[in-house]
Image: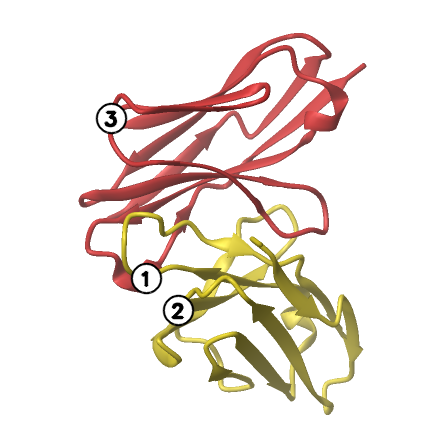
Chain colours: A yellow, B red
Amino acid sequence: DTEVTQTPKHLVMGMTNKKSLKCEQHMGHRAMYWYKQKAKKPPELMFVYSYEKLSINESVPSRFSPECPNSSLLNLHLHALQPEDSALYLCASSQIEGPYNEQFFGPGTRLTVL
Amino acid sequence: EDQVTQSPEALRLQEGESSSLNCSYTVSGLRGLFWYRQDPGKGPEFLFTLYSAGEEKEKERLKATLTKKESFLHITAPKPEDSATYLCAVQAGDNQGGKLIFGQGTELSVKP
């Protein structure tokens, strides 16, 4: 099973709302990633978790707060977002050890901030 | 600085008209080069990983090749369902936590 699932598929929120994006994988991967993608642009890395610990934060504003409750789950908590944060948010996972470290992406959450 | 450049930005083909997409890269020690396909509004779909110069991989109408400076994605006799954006990404040898460096993508349109 090479599936990464994400919920919700679509999210509309106001600038004062608090919401969360969820990601799940059951491939036994120990690295999980959050990306942000704007239209006609490649995915832009936000956070990396390795063995459930935050290993990379690409200088993301604090209104985005990641959480990795266990090796299968990854959350992204959103608070006080700006309209320019509207984008497709992608979760991905991969192995850490060994030669096969390709990242598998979920379908994404389309976020609109009003 | 690690960098990936894809060309062309957009490619329009007639059904059955074979062509190639290019991915040029500069990276400090290549750990892997990855090709993805992305349909509008969806997540990237993994296609291939290439690890060393001379390596080739095939899947249906797609064939990926790798040299020390670039990779090609050859599309043989494409069909309209091959229309998508094709992304190339590299991972540096020092891993950097699994970070991928993406090119800007090639938007492929195949007309019947």
Give percent across and percent down for residue A80.
65, 88
Q: Residue at x 63, y 46 (%)?
A: A40
Q: Does B35 appear above or below A87?
A: above
Check contact, mark 1 vs mark 2: CB within 8 A.
yes
Q: Marks 1/3: CA distance?
A: 23 Å
Q: Nearer the viewer, residue B95 or B12?
A: B95
Q: Marks 1/2: CA distance?
A: 6 Å
Q: Please, which chain is the residue tagged with disc 3 on?
A: B
Residue to which mark 1 is pinned: A96
Q: Nearer the viewer, residue A23 or A15?
A: A23
Respond whether the residues carrying marks 1 and 3 are from the same subunit.
Answer: no
Q: Marks 3/2: CA distance?
A: 28 Å
Residue to which mark 2 is pinned: A30
Which secondary structure lies at badge 1? Answer: loop
Residue to which mark 3 is pinned: B53
Q: Residue at x 74, y 72 (%)?
A: A8
Give percent across and percent down for residue B102.
43, 46
Check contact, mark 1 vs mark 3: CB within 8 A.
no
Q: Which mark is residue A71?
A: none
